[in-house]
Amino acid sequence: MNYKPLDSNKVYLITGAAGFIGYFLSRKLLEQGCQVIGVDNLNDYYDVNLKYARLEQLKPYEKFTFIKGDISDKTMITRVFEEYKPNVVVNLAAQAGVRYSIENPDVYIQSNIIGFFNILEACRHHPVEHLVYASSSSVYGSNKKVPFEETDFVDHPVSLYASTKKSNELMAHTYSHLYNIPATGLRFFTVYGPMGRPDMAYFGFTDKYFAGEPIKIFNNGDFENDLYRDFTYIDDIIEGIERIIGKPPADSVPHSVYNIGNNNPEKLMVFIETLERVISNTLGQKVVFKKIFEPIKPGDVPATYASTDFLQQAVGFKPATLIEEGLQKFANWYVKYYGVKGKH
């Protein structure tokens, strides 16, 4: 669907610019001639080489400025706002991962709560046209009603990560109310694709296969009541963000929240079979993962399934990339990037 490109005369601050979504969004804006200020702390939650590889691809763009820093560093954030005077802020910097939050709670409070507070304070003292920030489908917790709608009750998060994301929505709403900051939260649903996050299941499964190791599937081997996930391809996420950037909320409290998901949940086992098939296509030989079935982990939810009606009404767009197509692009990238070969 055609839509108006963003204003290339504006300054876009993207935190988490070396991350998966941050990198693709930065590249998309730079391709349109926008000035992008990227901030990232380049932490080692997953392979830092991948973050550097993403940054390498952004370096050739003259209008890209990279600042290594942590959003929990208030002095640094204040300085960036004072120096570059961003018109639009997209806050994608966050400590990600549900399971990791059980083992390392401190970093989630530091990045997702204190860091986001610093962004809000900076937007308060240096007004912006729009603050877009990453929330998460995890805020829906173990809600049984599907598809998940933005109007659903989300006061029962089942992981600290989810709690921090729900807190972000509350904090942003408060700042929008008090200081009239136009802000939009985006609840992302299982984002995947080339140059993605190695801590995500599809990437980990592929790693395990090439290492000759079995994959662990946390569904008790229960194929009837399998886990469902709304897998959303990276290009769809980027188009959604881009459209949202150009549509700041204008209500009396200018704060909105939207789901960005595929609105088409897949059983985890179907996803795994598709991944086996696309890697087979890339290698030109049959690929079957060795599988170990284990109980569902604490903090995991049985199903994520997004209603995208609000998003469609607001910006005329809904994600539509099929997993077969998206995973094929991932498999082709993975084999080339890591230089792996099939088994003989």
Image (cartoon, rainbow, N blue to C red):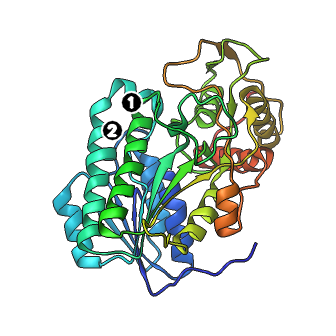
Say which quarter of the image contains residue 108: top left
Image position, residue 186 (x, y; %): 52, 54
Q: Secondary structure at mark 2?
A: helix
Tell me which numbered mark, 2 or 1, is placed earlier along the sequence. Answer: 1
Residue 142 showing in the rendered view: yes
Is 94 located above or below residue 16 in the figure?
Answer: above
Q: From this viewpoint, is residue 68 visible?
A: no
Tags 2 and 1 in contact by the CB under 8 Å rule? yes
| Amino acid type for the residue under numbered disc 2 | Tyr
Residue 88 vertical placement versus 23 (above, below) = below
Left or right, 248 with respect to 261, comes to: left
**Residue located beneath label 1 in the image:** 101
Q: Quadrant of the C terminus?
A: top right
Above or below, comparing residue 46 to residue 343 in the picture: below
Count neighbours of disc 2 (C-alpha within 10 A) and say few if under 14, some if 14 to 19, many if 20 or more. many
Could you tell me which residue is drawn at 36 percent across and 41 percent down? 44
What residue is disc 2 on?
A: 108
For residue 109, which quarter of the picture? top left
Question: Where is the N terminus found, in terms of image quarters?
Answer: bottom right
Residue 263 rendering spot, x and y as whole percentages:
73, 47
Circle 1 SS class: helix
Residue 201 on image: x %, y %:
60, 32
Q: Residue furthest left?
A: 75
Of residues 305 and 278, the one nearer the viewer is 305
| Rendered location of residue 153, percent (x, y) | 53, 38
Which labelled disc corresponds to residue 127? none
Type of the residue with mark 1: Ser
> Could you tell me which residue is drawn at 27 percent across and 33 percent down?
106
Query: Which residue: 56% across, 77% down?
Result: 31
Q: Residues within 10 Å of mark 1 (few under 14, many from 20)?
A: some
